[in-house]
Image: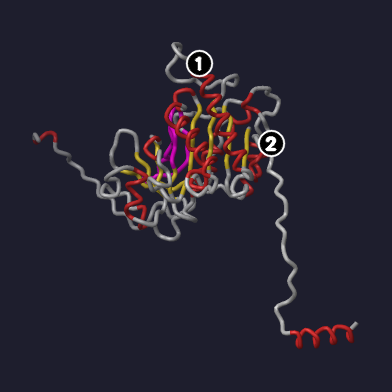
């Protein structure tokens, strides 16, 4: 280094507290979302971390109560302007019976939360949309440009392991895995994207984990899981997601474009009141006649299951004690 190139002033920054400890307020919902820069989180340098959603799939890994809902709802809020204009259509799968997403039901063009058959149908129809766009756009463009007439379809899946590993119906599980494999390998370029959250990132739970180009690691239970979510060597480069403190819900690690080092961020906290407000102000359009706008129904109704026969059984008490209780009850009446 030449003498004249040496700096004359050196700034030394001493960090005395965790910059991400304060809760992050929700970001404003833009009228027209920038799909290449959706504001979702605050960085350690107090800058804003934005997600490049266009032409990618997103995997969110985190243990129970680590704040996966913060990531998902921050994304929904950033897309809200495009949802109500018809630029973006959300197809949501909530295997927990709607406990996470039912409150925002008006925002979603498609919603399945009760029947696994309905969830499989939703994924099959997403593949149908993908195939139609491939046929229509082949030879014209390489990356789909969302418009109100040809919107971006974002398939949001909460607790993805319930579909890929824990579902007892083997045939239905195989059908779901086939649709997901097609969407993840071919859907990004034609505007059919998958955003999925799960707790266990092991290969046997999510066999197509490597098909997610964008990954987010929240608090995890094991050191090995960090590399499973973010890629080999991420923990050695500073992503200590397995050492997250208890207060750090919604705090996680992301990989910035062009840099191998992970960045620590905290996603905004979207409360129930915020969700109700979003659902009221940014409801999805219901007047479109195409496959993307089947609002307020599941693909397949919840099947009617007959009640199981049960043998009548008396109380588990000795006969003598039952006689005494019956006598007391008769006198009291």
User: Which residue shows up at 89% across the image and 87% down it?
Assistant: 331
Horizontal side of 210 relative to 122 (left or right) equals left
Residue density around tag 2, few if under 14, some if 14–19, many if 20 or more, within 10 Å: few
| Magenta highlight range | 38-59
Closest to the observer: 271 or 178? 178
Secondary element type, mark 1: helix
Q: Is residue 236 above or below residue 172?
A: below
Could you tell me residue 45's position as x and y percent? 36, 45
Could you tell me residue 8's position as x and y percent? 17, 41
User: Which residue shows up at 69% across the image and 29% down it?
Assistant: 286
User: Which residue shows up at 46% across the image and 14% down it?
Assistant: 138
The disc placed on residue 135 is 1
Closest to the observer: 7 or 223? 223
Residue found at the far top of this picture: 139
The disc placed on residue 256 is none
Residue density around tag 1, few if under 14, some if 14–19, many if 20 or more, within 10 Å: few
Q: Is residue 325 above or below residue 143?
A: below
Protein image colouring: secondary structure
User: Which residue shows up at 29% across the image and 37% down it?
Assistant: 259
Residue 15 falls inside the magenta stretch: no
Residue found at the far left of this picture: 2
Horizontal side of 225 relative to 84 (left or right) equals left
Residue at the disc numbered 2 = 297
Closest to the observer: 91 or 35? 91
Horizontal side of 201 relative to 106 (left or right) equals left
Image quadrant assignment for residue 115 = top right
Between the C-alphas of marks 1 and 2, the distance is: 28 Å
**Label located before the other in sequence (1 or 2):** 1
Could you tell me residue 267's position as x and y percent? 47, 46
Residue 54 falls inside the magenta stretch: yes
Could you tell me residue 269's position as x and y percent? 53, 49
Secondary element type, mark 2: loop
């Amino acid at each position: 280094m030449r003498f004249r190139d040496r700096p004359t002033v050196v700034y030394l920054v001493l960090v005395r507290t965790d910059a991400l400890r304060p809760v992050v307020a929700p970001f404003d919902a833009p009228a027209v979302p920038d799909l290449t820069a959706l504001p979702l989180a605050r960085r350690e340098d107090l800058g804003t971390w934005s997600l490049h959603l266009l032409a990618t799939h997103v995997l969110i890994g985190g243990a129970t109560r680590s704040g996966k809902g913060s990531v998902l709802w921050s994304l929904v809020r950033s897309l809200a302007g495009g949802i109500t204009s018809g630029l973006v259509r959300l197809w949501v799968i909530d295997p927990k019976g709607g406990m996470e997403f039912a409150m925002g039901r008006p925002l979603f063009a498609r919603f399945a939360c009760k029947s696994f058959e309905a969830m499989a149908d939703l994924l099959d129809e997403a593949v149908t949309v993908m195939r139609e766009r491939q046929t229509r756009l082949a030879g014209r463009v390489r990356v789909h440009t969302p418009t109100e007439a040809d919107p971006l379809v974002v398939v949001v899946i909460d607790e993805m392991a319930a579909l890929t590993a824990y579902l007892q119906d083997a045939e239905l599980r195989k059908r779901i895995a086939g649709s997901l494999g097609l969407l993840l390998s071919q859907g990004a370029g034609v505007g059919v994207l998958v955003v999925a959250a799960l707790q266990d990132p092991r290969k046997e739970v999510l066999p197509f984990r490597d098909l997610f180009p964008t990954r987010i690691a929240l608090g995890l239970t094991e050191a090995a899981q960090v590399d499973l979510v973010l890629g080999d060597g991420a923990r050695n480069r500073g992503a200590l997601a397995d050492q997250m403190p208890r207060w750090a819900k919604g705090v996680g690690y992301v990989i910035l474009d062009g840099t191998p080092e992970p960045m620590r961020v905290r996603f905004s906290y979207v409360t129930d009141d915020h969700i109700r407000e979003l659902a009221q102000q940014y409801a999805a359009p219901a007047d479109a006649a195409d496959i993307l706008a089947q609002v307020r129904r599941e693909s397949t109704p919840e099947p009617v299951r007959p009640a199981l026969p049960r043998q009548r059984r008396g109380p588990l008490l000795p006969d003598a004690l039952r006689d005494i209780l019956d006598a007391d009850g008769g006198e009291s009446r």
